[in-house]
Image: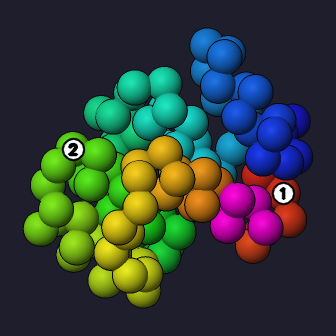
């Protein structure tokens, strides 16, 4: 089970995300692996603000800044202006910190 950001990052070398990983983090895992479609499938029907934040990030990765802006508003977050790598890390750390764990 992944329990902190360092372990989450290390898990990206694996073939699949850790079992029980929350949807927004599972999507970020796939995004880090270059699996944009898989990541998008995971968050597109989730109704949480965390999923909306990841959804915004994914559309920013895609280059669809208009759609990203919509999802940032749904997440209650400002549109990111830093690098994609920096935003990915910021989201990972925030999701882990807010939940206290990343998997059940």
Q: Quadrant of the N terminus?
A: top right
Which residue is rendered at x = 81% and y = 39% of the image?
Answer: 6
Indicate yes or no whether the magenta region holds residue 79. no
Q: Residues within 10 Å of mark 1 (few under 14, many from 20)?
A: some
Contact, mark 1 vs mark 2 (Cβ under 8 Å): no
Where does label 1 land, which residue? 101
As drawn, is 63 to the left or to the right of 5?
A: left
Which residue is rendered at x = 48% and y = 25% of the image?
Answer: 33
Query: Could you tell me which secondary element the residue under label 1 belongs to?
Result: loop
Task: Give the mark, 1 or 2, whose residue is nearer the N terminus.
Answer: 2
Which residue is rendered at x = 84% and y = 57% of the image?
Answer: 101
As drawn, is 45 to the left or to the right of 3?
A: left
- In the image, residue 77 sits, relative to residue 33, either above or below, namely below
Magenta span: predominant SS is helix
Disc 1 versus disc 2: distance between alpha carbons? 28 Å
Q: Residues within 10 Å of mark 2 (few under 14, many from 20)?
A: few
> Can residue 24 be seen from the camera position used here?
no
Of the two numbered discs 1 and 2 in the rendering, the one whose residue sits closer to the viewer: 2
Query: Could you tell me which secondary element the residue under label 2 belongs to?
Result: helix
Q: Residue 55 falls in which quadrant of the image?
A: bottom left
Q: Which residues are magenta?
A: 93-97
Q: Position of residue 24 (x, y in %)?
A: 54, 54
Q: Position of residue 47 (x, y in %)?
A: 43, 71
As drawn, is 70 to the left or to the right of 48?
A: left
Residue 67 numbered tag? none
Residue 62 numbered tag? 2
């Amino acid at each position: 089970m992944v329990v902190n950001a360092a372990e989450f990052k290390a898990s990206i070398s694996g073939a699949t995300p850790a079992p029980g990983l929350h949807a927004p983090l599972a999507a970020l895992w796939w995004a880090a692996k270059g699996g944009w479609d898989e990541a998008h499938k995971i968050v597109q029907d989730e109704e949480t603000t965390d999923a909306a934040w990841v959804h915004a990030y994914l559309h920013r990765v895609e280059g669809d800044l208009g759609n990203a802006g919509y999802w940032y508003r749904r997440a209650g977050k400002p549109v990111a202006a830093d690098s994609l790598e920096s935003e990915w890390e910021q989201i990972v750390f925030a999701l882990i910190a807010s939940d206290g764990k990343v998997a059940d």
